[in-house]
Image: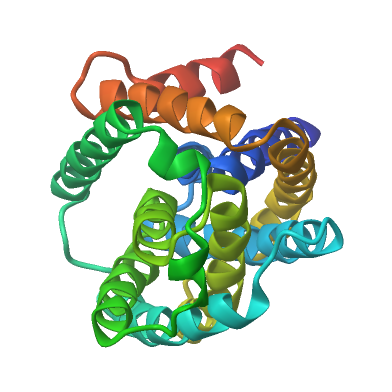
Amino acid sequence: MTIIEVIILIISGLLVGFINTLAGGGSIISLSILMFLGLPANIANGTNRIAIFIQNIAAVGSFRQQKVLDHKKGFWLAIPAALGSILGAWIAVDMREDIIEKAIAIVMLIMMFVILYKPQRWLKGKEDLQKKKVSVWQAILFFAIGIYGGFLHMGVGYALLAGIVLGAGYDLVKANAIKVFIILIWSPVILLVFMFSGEVNYAYGLILSIGNVAGALIASRLAVKKGAAFVRWVIIAVIVLTAAHVFGLIDIKSAVSSVIQSS
């Protein structure tokens, strides 16, 4: 591994950690980087899980320190999600990536219009919903989200945010804290599946993690300091860019490759 590759992994990890903690979808960058550096798609997917796991340790610690994380509710939502993630990780081999990306983009665009149409749902929590126990339908929903998170992870943050905000009544800042907590719970399980299958490059994953941690710490501090309105606009910006990439209006992967080649 060259110094240039190390620098590229850390810088891309910084961006990915920031995006993943505040919104979601940052893995499109890390997966593109890892594959450009020569890793097959399945190993890139497994390697990315190291950075995701370590990134969320940092993010959860930061949100907890700032007293915006509801551990109890997050734990009960994490149980079905973690179970679903195990199933998703085992089937993460055969489905076509282009179909998955288009499905993600459609869901993300729908979510963006919901955020813009009724922003108060995302900016102000509902304490009555927060105090309710996790229902059967919520367990089923988070199990399904977990299946997708185990399969690919890219874009799963949006599904989690929608479930936590609209279904459990939290504002975007507290929802982000619960989101990274849930991902932290299922991440080691998924990582073990990929490790067991021999689909992890540890050197690349650990170096990528350095940037992911830095990005996660910056993002968690900004989320609490700037509030839910700031988080909402970051989410909208990321959705627009990701959807534009999926539908061919821009090519993020080619842009990433060009940056690497020019360096």
In the current view of this chain or complex, which residue is farthest to the front? 128
Q: Residue at 48% across / 46% down in the picture? A: 27
Up/down of 28 relative to 39, above or below: above
Left or right of residue 96, residue 7 in this image: right
Up/down of 220 relative to 243, above or below: below
Task: Where is residue 218? Give x, y as percent.
Answer: 78, 39
The quarter holding residue 192 reads: bottom right
The coloring applied to the image is rainbow
Which quadrant: the C terminus? top right
The quarter holding residue 48 reads: bottom right
Task: Where is residue 162? Give x, y as percent.
Answer: 36, 53
Left or right of residue 32, residue 10 in this image: right
The quarter holding residue 132 reads: bottom left
Residue 228 visible within the image: yes
Q: Residue at 50% across / 85% down in the picture? A: 76
Q: Residue at 32% across / 33% down in the picture? A: 118
Up/down of 214 relative to 15, above or below: below
Nearest the viewer among 247 and 167 is 167
Nearest the viewer among 187 and 64 is 64
The total of numbered circles placed on residues is 0
Left or right of residue 32, residue 137 in this image: left
Nearest the viewer among 5 and 31 is 31
Residue 35 visible within the image: no
Task: Where is residue 255? Give x, y as percent.
Answer: 45, 17
Which quadrant: the N terminus? top right
Q: Residue at 76% across / 51% down in the picture? A: 213
